[in-house]
Amino acid sequence: MTTVNVYIPPTPASSYEIIIDDGLINHPQKWLPKNLSFHHLVIITDHTVKKYYLNPLVEALNKLGHYPLTLSFPAGEKHKHQATKQILEEKILRKHFGRDTLCIALGGGVVGDLAGFIAATYMRGIPYIQIPTTLLAMVDSSVGGKTAIDTPQGKNLIGAFWQPKVVVADIDCLKTLPEEHLISGIVEALKMFLTNDIDSFHYLQKNMSAIFQQNKRILKTLVQRAVTIKAQVVAADETEKNLRMILNFGHTIGHALEKLTQYKLPHGYAVAYGILLECSISRELGYLGEQHYAQIENALNQLGFHVDYLKKLNITNIIRATKSDKKASEGNARYILLKQPGEVHHENGMVAHAVDEQVVRAAFRRL
Ligand SMILES: NC(=O)c1ccc[n+]([C@@H]2O[C@H](COP(=O)([O-])OP(=O)(O)OC[C@H]3O[C@@H](n4cnc5c(N)ncnc54)[C@H](O)[C@@H]3O)[C@@H](O)[C@H]2O)c1
């Protein structure tokens, strides 16, 4: 079993562990925090994850004398909204559960964001535990305390920073994960490594086929390396004033591609193409060398992402879509730029930069 600590200053009380191992769902005694007292327990999951993992978790909790209320909602981003939140909250309220309730989010990023936001606001905040079941949720969304729902105006626009008490990454859950979602998780790990850790970038490249073959040892190391970075970044900048923005690498273009495809392009795939074009921007500005660009392009090619997809798109539409990104500043999209794999470009201490539209166009032509 591997553990990584997330230290959120200045309140050590909001620090927590990420526990990574196989078989964790069947052994809650390994991760239920001993210092957490609660009288009620609610598990929130989606209909797909429920089929695979709810019963084993409930049975294991029963053995410890806990009898949770179990709630689920239809899987998918389109249910991460206010109506679902309200339905679930009313079900908990009807049981008269008070502040002494512990919430467990069992699922991918959608469940984690939604259940985390319920925990953040129910009775002005109750403790919760993240049990991520997708690779993306294990390497990224379950750590860092960002919780949110979508609105017709955009994704994740209503939410709160609310840190979990513990994150439990059970690698065994990945066995049932469709390949498309495995790839999305690998892309988010790649994002983490390209901005922070060249060794892990090489590790990922070297072990790509072992990851697809579900090699447990490699998967555990991959998750551990990615969350170690996420934990460091979050500890340094919990509320995204500067450094945490490096986690948006690939996302300025990625979000624009999601919008232009009416969210038909999966998030991780959009980020992969976003990384390609944003690296081309870094190259165009002279920060990223040709050889390093080729190395990154090669890693994305290994995952099935090629520039041909981007070349068929209209750059004017992409640029327009980047301007409405919620991280744009005064209508200008901001980018995380690379100097080399593992190192981002800093200017005046800042990591996110406005880029002239003509540079984006030139970078697109050079793909
Ligand atoms: N809070 C954050 O910091 C943060 C960071 C990144 C992304 N996100 C959010 O995460 C969400 C995307 O997360 P996701 O990719 O995990 O999507 P998801 O939660 O929709 O999961 C993808 C699909 O896989 C299914 N699934 C989950 N675990 C499974 C398993 N073990 N076996 C089989 N099927 C399984 C789900 O039911 C769903 O259909 C987005 O809403 C995004 O905004 C949040």
Image (spheres, rainbow, N blue to C red):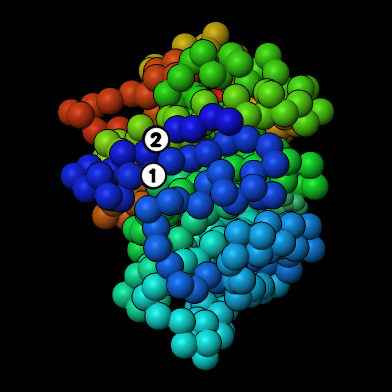
Amino acid at pointer 2: Asn
Quarter holding residue 242:
top left
- Left or right: residue 316 versus residue 220 is left
The N terminus lies in quadrant = top right
Q: Secondary structure at mark 2?
A: strand
Quadrant assignment for ligand 1: bottom right
| Residue 361 visible to the viewer | no
Q: Earlier in the sequence, mark 2 or mark 1?
A: 2
Q: Residues within 10 Å of mark 2 (few under 14, many from 20)?
A: some
User: In the orientation shown, which residue stands out farthest toward the top?
Assistant: 291
Mark number, residue 226: none
Mark number, residue 5: 2
* Residue 46 x/y as whole percent: 68, 66
Q: Residue at x 57, y 49 (%)?
A: 29
- Left or right: residue 276 versus residue 144 is right
Above or below — where is 311 with respect to 104? above
| Residue 108 visible to the viewer | yes
* Residue 37 x/y as whole percent: 40, 63
* Residue closest to the eye, 37 or 24: 37
Q: What residue sits right under mark 1 in the picture?
A: 16
Q: Secondary structure at mark 1?
A: strand
- Left or right: residue 109 versus residue 324 is right
Above or below — where is 296 with respect to 94? above
Q: Residues within 10 Å of mark 1 (few under 14, many from 20)?
A: many
Q: Residue at x 53, y 70 (%)?
A: 41
* Residue 288 x/y as whole percent: 44, 17
Quarter holding residue 100:
bottom left
Above or below — where is 21 with respect to 333? above
Amino acid at pointer 1: Tyr
Q: Residue at x 50, y 61 (%)?
A: 113
- Left or right: residue 161 versus residue 214 is left
Q: Are marks 2 and 1 in contact (CB under 8 Å)?
A: yes
